[in-house]
Amino acid sequence: MNNRIAIFPGTFDPITIGHYDIIIRSLNLFDKIIIAIGNNSEKNNMFSIKKRKEWIKKTFFQFPKIEIELFKGLTIFFCKKKKAQFILRGIRNQLDFEFEKNIYYANKKLYKNSCIETIFIFSSYDKSYISSCMVRDIIKNGGNYTIFVPKYVRINKKFF
């Protein structure tokens, strides 16, 4: 039997309830979901990769179909390394769709004979406005970020 393995890539700086929602709603589609924590060269991460991985591990500890891994480089090459057939992406709005569509086409060009498909899952309506960028801004400005992240994401006040 061919295992249906999906890679859900992101920086997760921090993971949000929007990310959580996409992953939970996708569990019945795949035999395994690998949450792949990557480094985006265009982003200045607020939290260390170690802290982000810790939060994600605690958030999904009760789900045996979910694994957490770190990766560098292009997602499509990480998929090949992990023998994943799918890239899982959440879509909040039209801007996300246009951005993800272009990455999809670039991946197809880079890896022409690939059987790797991108699966787009629309955000739940009540979470479609949540982004890690927004959460970081709320954190920086002393707002209540806890309503936008899973319960294990807690920031030490000494961080600031």
Image: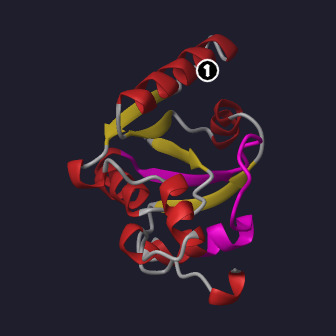
Disc 1, SS:
helix
Q: Nearer the viewer, residue 129 or 5?
A: 129
Q: Which residue type does callout 1 highlight?
A: Asn
Q: Horizontal and vertical percent for residue 69?
A: 66, 58
Q: Quadrant of residue 53?
A: bottom right
Q: Residue at x 74, y 53 (%)?
A: 44
Q: Horizontal and vertical percent for residue 19?
A: 43, 55
Instruction: Specify the quadrant that holds the N terminus.
Output: top left
Say whether residue 43 is magenta: yes
Say whether residue 45 is magenta: yes
- Residue furthest to the front in view is 141
Q: Residue at x 69, y 39 (%)?
A: 78
**Residue 47 versus residue 1 in the image, above or below:** below
Q: Nearer the viewer, residue 88 or 123?
A: 123
Find the magenta span and give its range: 30-54
For the rendered model, the colour scheme is secondary structure
Instruction: Specify the quadrant that holds the C terminus.
Output: bottom right
Q: Is residue 152 left or right of residue 110?
A: left
Residue bearing mark 1: 107
Q: Residue at x 33, y 39 (%)?
A: 121
Q: Quadrant of residue 24?
A: bottom left
Q: Residues within 10 Å of mark 1 (few under 14, many from 20)?
A: some
Q: Horizontal and vertical percent for residue 6?
A: 49, 43
Q: Horizontal and vertical percent for residue 106?
A: 62, 16
Q: Is residue 45 left or right of residue 56?
A: right
Q: Residue at x 60, y 60 (%)?
A: 13
